[in-house]
Image (tube, helix red, strand yellow):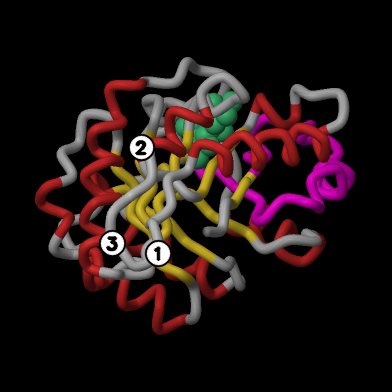
Amino acid sequence: MTTRINPSILAADFANLEHELGRIASADLVHVDVMDNHFVPNLTFGPQMVGRLQEVSPIPLDVHLMISDVDRWAPGYAELGAFSVTFHAEATDAPVALARRLREIGARAGIALKPGTDVEPYLELLPEFDQVLVMTVEPGFGGQSFMPETMPKLERLSRVVRETGLDVWLQVDGGISLDTIGIAAEAGADTFVAGSAVFGADVPADRIMALRDSAAAHRHGPVPGTGSLVG
Ligand code: DX5
Ligand code: ZN
């Protein structure tokens, strides 16, 4: 099973982003938090900035849109060449149409759920998506504490993905550290966003490796031939 670590550049030095990207070149993807000061009470970067990051990044971009009006803005990020574009379920009435548009352009389509958003209505839409992002903090800021109460949602998603055999990545974002990554891995996450835990480390590459090892050690795998799960 693949375990992905996606450092969030929200915790990087914004004055030296190209250098910061170099420090996390051993990661799987770079997580780019786009905020509009409307969907969330914080403002980061827009398409022009993300386009430039796309040009200089040694690893693919995992764009997390914490913005309103995604139907208008999300396709532009796919057109810039982002590997994945994730929009919030709470920000559109037409998630399937938008996901199809993103895939058509060539990006992986992701849907993000805030901690208070129920997953049930989205389960039947899973074939339309390549990844689901379960927010483990309220979106808007880095450095917050992991919310364990979001784990049942992840467990539910993980069960459905296993039962249906869909190839949907399950991502967690917010408060992921060496202390919490195991909890999310046990609940079924395979893709882990970490901002402060990576960029707050003396050597981000070492922290990426430690996070990956810890997640892998906590992930449950199927027992060959039995269809049941270890652990
Ligand atoms: C929060 C962002 C996260 C944030 C995570 O709204 O979506 O990606 O950067 O930061 P940490 O890992 O510090 O909680
Ligand atoms: Zn994020």
Q: Measuring 30% from the left and 41% from the top, which residue is drawn there?
A: 154
Where does residue 196 sit, x and y in percent of width and height? 66, 25
**Where is mark 1, residue-wise?**
224
Indicate whether residue 170 is drawn in magenta: no
Mark closer to the chain start, 2 or 1: 2
Kind of residue at badge 3: Gly
Query: Dividing the picture into quarters, in which one does residue 80 lie?
Result: bottom right
Where does residue 140 sit, x and y in percent of width and height? 45, 29
Indicate whether residue 22 is drawn in magenta: yes
Mark closer to the chain start, 2 or 3: 2
Work out whether 79 lies above or below 182: below
Is residue 170 visible in the rendered structure shown here? yes
Report the front residue among 228 and 2: 228
Of marks 2 and 3, the one in the foreground: 3
- Stretch in magenta: 7-34
Where does residue 66 sit, x and y in percent of width and height? 42, 42
Q: Measuring 81% from the left and 52% from the top, which residue is drawn there?
A: 25
Of marks 2 and 1, the one in the foreground: 1
Kind of residue at badge 2: Ala
Kind of residue at badge 1: Pro
Q: Is residue 180 left or right of residue 4?
A: left
Question: Label 1's element?
Answer: loop
**Label of residue 227 in the image:** 3
Work out whether 53 lies above or below 218: below
Q: Measuring 75% from the left and 40% from the top, which residue is drawn there?
A: 209
Work out whether 103 lies above or below 131: below
As measured in the structure, the alpha-carbon distance from the residue carrying label 1 to the one carrying label 3 is 7 Å
**Label of residue 187 in the image:** 2
